[in-house]
Amino acid sequence: MLPNDFVRLVDERGPALLLYARQWCHAPEDVVQGAFLKLVALRSPPRDVVAWLYRVVRNGAIDAGKADLRRQRRETATARPTRWFIEPALDGLDAEAAVAALRRLPVEEREVIVARLWGGLSFEQIAEAAGCSASTAFRRYSAGIDALRKELGVPCPNPSPNA
């Protein structure tokens, strides 16, 4: 195909191909451009260039529309907040209430509790991550656990003998 013929084809058929592709996808320009690039890459032009372009644009637009839907589903699933607890109830603990109570804790206490219980970090590791001493990390952990127990109505499993 000669360059002048190609330019004329793009000018004459491009707008209609865009409209045709738009019914299946949100980025018809990309699909039409891809079809013209495929046409240029062919060793010999198809018997009916216009019909070939419409077929390639149709297939490309349908594929692009499917890809858009898959991407939207992935983004929607990723945007959903993940639960901190997998089980809805664990040994009588209401996961929703526990998450809500954890969110109401001061950030410093919540950070230490999450790092200790779910991260498995030692108090020394937590201290390094939080920029405090290990004893401060332990105090924050203890205060946070006590606050959670009170809010959730869970008694301390090992009450101190002095209490």
Image (cartoon, rainbow, N blue to C red):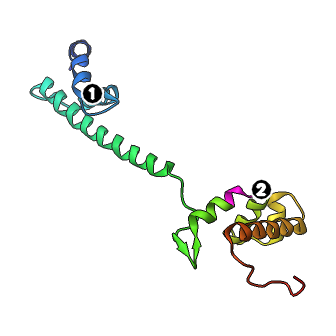
- Residue at horizontal 35 percent and vertical 29 percent from the top: 27
Q: Return the residue at label 2.
A: 106
Taking the image as shown, residue 95 lies to the left or right of residue 129, namely left
Q: Is label 1 or label 2 in front?
A: 2
Give the quarter of the image for residue 57.
Answer: top left
Residue 152 coordinates in the image, percent (x, y): 67, 69
- Specify the quadrant of the image occupied by residue 51: top left
Determine the residue positioned at 31% across, 28% down.
28
Q: Nearer the viewer, residue 138 or 2?
A: 138
Q: Is residue 125 shown above or below 3?
A: below
- Side of 65 where 120 appears, left or right: right
| Residue on which disc 1 sits | 22
- Which amino acid does the dot numbered 1 rest on? Arg
* Amino acid on which the number 2 mark rests in the picture: Pro
On residue 132, the disc is none
Q: Residues within 10 Å of mark 2 (few under 14, many from 20)?
A: few
Quadrant of the snapshot with the N terminus: top left
Residue 12 vertical position relative to residue 138 in the rendered view, above or below: above
Verify whether residue 39 appears in magenta: no
Please state the horizontal and vertical placement of residue 85, each as a whole percent of the image.
57, 67
Find numbered disc 1 in the image and state the secondary structure of the residue it sits on. Answer: helix
In percent of the image, x 77 and y 64: which residue is there?
Answer: 112
- Residue bounds of the magenta highlight: 102-106
In terms of secondary structure, what is the magenta stretch mainly?
A: helix
| Helix, strand or loop under label 2 | loop
Residue at 27% x, 27% y: name it: 22
